[in-house]
Image: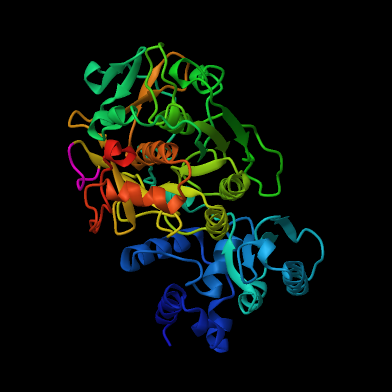
Amino acid sequence: MNKNVFYLLMLFFVFTACSREDLQNSPVEMEIAQKDPLSSKQINEKINETIKTKGKFSWSGSSDHFVWSAIFQGNKIASIGFGSSFDRSLNPDNAAIENEILDLIKKYEGKTDRILLSSDKFLNQIDVAIEKQETVIALRKMKNIRYLEPADYHYFENENKFNGTAKSSGSSSGCGFESTALSATDYTTVTPNAKAPWSFAQHNITSAWTYSTGAGITIGVIDSGVSPEQTLLGSSFNNGLSSGRTIAKNGVYVDSVWPWSTGYDGSADQCGHGTSMASAIAAPRNNQGQPVGVAYNANLVTYRAASNVVLDGYHEQNGVKIAFTELGNNTSVKIISMSMGHIFSVGKIEDGVKYAYSKGKLIFCAGGTSTSFTNFVGVIFPAWMPETQAITGVKENTSNQKCDVCHSGAEIDFTYQMERASGNNIPVLSYYNGQTDYVGGSSVATASTAGIAALVWSKNPSWSRDQVLNKMRQSSTYYPNPNSDYGYGNINVLQAVQ
């Protein structure tokens, strides 16, 4: 056979043999095709191709060789979910299963040390070091394993390296420390001297404040943290008409490129995104002439869980998982808002979401915001999960015209008007004290909708999560027949709290 023809045939096999069963049941082909890992470029290309042709990509639907290649290219760290449930408390034999997994890894890896990176105390999930393809093949045959995934494969970082086009929220990270003077047409002044963003009138939020301001409701915010320089989200959070509430700031992110590193770097926002989200939800209503949040009397529990909105590496994904489980265990928290995500699922985050949901939390996640790179992607993860409410942003006076950088799709549950004809978005507090800014995309739509949920729950404190959701749906544009791409549409908040 001509050498070039043989080479092309081998490349064809590498890129198309993505069925797990095909590889496991074809030992000859496995021996030929699986000697070397795919490159990061090849892995990204296959992921993109799968999303474009099938709508979604998952590691579980990929071949052993493909999964091993991504583990190999991602610091040789894997994430494993095991047992019949995500919840450790529901699996009395979880310790035995975990030990069985670790024993198998030690057997195939030929070593006994530096195997276990972490073992989650609430979830049936561990992170391990794996180098050999044979280990991956053996693990994926175990009946007690729910998933085996790369734990530190940097898809976005690689995409940017190869194409220079990976952008989200106008940048590669969604971060920014800008301060912008607000146009007088983008807000109305409300007593005692606060700025109510233009979108509040569109959703009847200011009118709804007659009935509810979010008092008594605690919202968890999973993001990049909160600025230590913005006193209205710090020492002055509890003042003016927003007196009698609290803000608690937590940090569960490890700022390191090395997965084995430990030690959280604090709760302070080093991106700017988390500060904007906290402002949109619950910035105080006082006499300082600054933008006010939707639920200005709600309590906040914020988490610095990642460095930016792209959950691309080990510590980002681990931080988000920890934040979901801790908020799930926080009995005072009723609502969780997260305006971050990924274009494909992450098993440990999925477990964390399910855990928080099982504790009765109402979870809002961003449907996706991007420019040139991921415009072929629909609703992102974890917003597409049935345990979350997926939110996207739409243009002013519409319920089915997404913002210029927003995603839409069948999984969207609600929309929020956040883009004006002028191009201006939602006024919020700046990272810096005494200054303002604008923020857009599905991120601010999500945070604002979480605030709306707080208004509804505050008005009806004895209600369950489902009752709150049903009232929000009944007060929306498309109830009772949701739109195929925009869910129930915009919420009339006055109607929702009456």
Q: Is residue 29 above or below residue 79?
A: below
**Res 404 visible:** no
Left or right of residue 114: residue 450: left
User: What span is colored magenta in the figure?
Assistant: 397-402
Task: Find residue 368 and report its horizontal and vertical position in percent.
Answer: 36, 48
Closest to the observer: 424 or 206? Answer: 206
Left or right of residue 64: residue 283: left
In which quadrant of the rendered view does residue 30 lie? bottom right
Task: Find residue 353 and report its horizontal and vertical position in percent.
Answer: 53, 54
Task: Find residue 273 and report its horizontal and vertical position in percent.
Answer: 45, 33
Residue 398: in magenta span: yes
Q: Is residue 48 above or below residue 157?
A: below
Residue 99: in magenta span: no
Q: Who's the residue at 23% across and 56% down the image?
A: 483
**Res 144 visible:** yes
Closest to the observer: 472 or 376? Answer: 472
Q: Who's the residue at 58% across and 45% down the image?
A: 327
Quarter of the image with the C terminus in it: top left
Q: Who's the residue at 68% across and 60% down the image?
A: 126
Quarter of the image with the N terminus in it: bottom left
Q: Is residue 31 above or below residue 340?
A: below
Left or right of residue 482: residue 12: right
Q: How many marks?
A: 0
Which colour scheme appears in the figure? rainbow
The prevailing secondary structure element of the residues shown in magenta is loop
In which quadrant of the rendered view does residue 266 lie? top right
Task: Find residue 220 and report its horizontal and vertical position in percent.
Answer: 52, 39
In which quadrant of the rendered view does residue 265 lie? top right
